[in-house]
Amino acid sequence: MIIIVDSLNKHEYPELLDAMFQLRARVFEGRLGWEVNVVDGREIDQFDDLDPAHVISVDEDGDVVGCMRLLQTTGPHMLSDVFSCLLDGEPPIRSSRVWEATRFCVDTKKLTRGKHPRSISYVTSEVMIGAFEYGLKAGIKDAVAVIDPVMDRVLKRSGNAPHGYLGSPKPMGKVTALAALMDCSQARIDSIRAFSGIRHDVFAAQPALSLAG
Amino acid sequence: MDIIDLSTVESSPDHCLLFLDQLCDRLELDCGSYATTNPVTGAVQGYANYPDAWKMHYMRRNLHRIDPTIHKAALSIAPVDWSRFEQDERFRAVFFAAHDFGVPRKGITIPIRGPYGDRGLLSVTRDCSDAEWERLIPEIIGELQMAAVHMHDAVMRSDVISRALRRPKLSAREREVLQWVAAGKTMQDIGDILLISNRTVEVHLRSAREKLGALTTVQAVGRAIGLGLIYPK
C-alpha cells in the first residue's frame, strides 16, 4: 500500500521516513554506486529539506519496499541543479504541470521476480500508480523521472514506457542515469493497472490531517 | 484569452486584482487571493478580491500570522483542499466568522515554488455543495496551476533586479519546437521532424510557454521572436 508523506504530515510517519532513507542508502550507495551522502546508513540530501512529497510503498510486514520523491519543476529540483549534466548543458524544463520524480527505487533484496505482490514489478507498478494518481488529482500532466537503465527496462516492460527522454544518458556510479518523460494520465494509470493486475485503491487510509506544531 | 496577461504589464495591485477577478469569473469561483511570504522578513504580501469587510477583519486581527492556508499549504507540492484543515484549530479560528462576511469556507490553495526558493500561494473559494465542489475542482485544477505560477512569476518579477535575472532560459529543444510552431507545424509534424513523440513535443511547448510567461502559444511565439530566441518565418 502507498502512503504519501510530505511536510504537512511527516510528523505522523517518522519511522516510515527513517526506513525510506535507509532503503535509499542501500540502493543508491550500495547497489547503484552513486555518489550520495550517507550518514548512519541513511541517504538524505538537500532536496529532502525542500518539502518534497515522498510516495512510499509499505508491504504486509510494515516494511518500506519502494519509494519515490516528487518536487515541482517550477522551484529548485535535482535536474535544475545536481543532475544538470544529464541535460547536456541545456536549461531544465520548468512547468506548473510537470513534476520531477527522483530517488525512485524498490527493495531488490526483499522483493523477487514475478508479478505477485512481493515482486519487484508489483511494487514498481504500485509506486507509479500512487504517484500518477496523486499527480493527476493535482492537475499535473507529465513527470520527468531520473532513472537508471534497469528501471527504464522495467517501465517499458510493465505498460509504463516513457514517451521521451531529455538530454542523454550519463554515467553515474556503476550505472548510467537518464531523464525520462511520462505523461501523468488516466490512460497510463489504466495501462499500469492492466499489466500489474492491481485493481484496488493503492492508498492506505491516511488519518485526517492533524496539524501539530 | 479574456484574462489579463500579467507578464505584459507592471504587476500593480490593480492588475493583480483584475487578474483574480477574471480568473474567478472564468472558472466559476467566488473569491481568490494570492500571497507570498518574504523569506527574509517574513512579511506577507498579497492580493485578494474578498469582500472589503472581511479583508479589514482579517488584517485588523493579523490573521495572516496564523492562517494555515498560508503557512501549512506552502509545505505541500500539491494543491491543498481546505477540507484537510477542518480539524485544525487555527483554521477554525481564522475562518469561523468567514461566513458572516460572505466568504465561503470551501476552498483550495495552490502552492507555487520559484527557482530561488521563493514561494507563493493562490487560493480560491466557492459557496457550493460538496458534490458541486468535487465536480468543479478536477475540471479547473490544471488552469489553476498555470494561473498560480503566472501570477507568482509576475509578482516576483515586479522589482527591477529580479526582472533582469529572469530572462527566460529556453533549452535548444524548446526553441526548436517553438520555431516549428511558428512555421505552422502541428504537434505531430514536429514530433516526426524531431523524431520524438508528440506528447514530448507538448511538454517542451508547455514549458517554453510558461518560461516566457505566455498564456497562449501564439503569445509565446511572439515573445520568443521579440527576444531573438527564434526567428520569424
Image (cartoon, coloured by chain):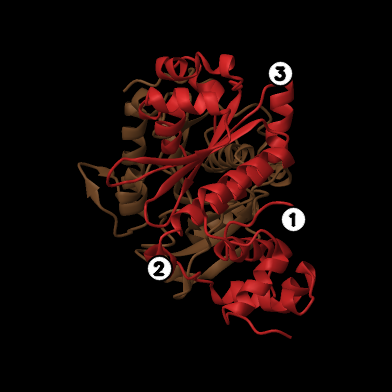
Chain colours: A brown, B red
Q: Is residue A15 visible?
A: yes
Horizontal placement of B162 versus B215: left or right?
Answer: left
Horizontal placement of B96 versus A193: left or right?
Answer: left
Query: In this orientation, which residue lies closer to the viewer: A166 or A153?
Result: A166
For label 3, count other residues whose C-alpha is less than 10 Å away and answer few (under 14), some (14-19) or many (20+): few
For label 1, count other residues whose C-alpha is less than 10 Å away and answer few (under 14), some (14-19) or many (20+): few
Q: What amino acid is found at the position of numbered circle 3 in the picture?
A: Ser
Q: Chain of mark 3?
A: B
Query: In this orientation, which residue lies closer to the viewer: A120 or A152?
Result: A152
Residue depicted at 62% across the width and 32% down the height: B31
Q: Are marks 2 and 3 in contact (CB under 8 Å)?
A: no
For label 2, count other residues whose C-alpha is less than 10 Å away and answer few (under 14), some (14-19) or many (20+): few
In the picture, the disc for residue B1 is: 1
Secondary structure at numbered mark 2: helix
Residue depicted at 39% across the width and 24% down the height: B60
Give the x, y percent position of residue B88.
43, 17
Q: In the rendered image of this protein, does residue A177 appear above or below residue B135?
A: below
Q: Chain of mark 1?
A: B
Between the residue at mark 2 and the residue at mark 3, the CA separation in whole angstroms equals: 45 Å
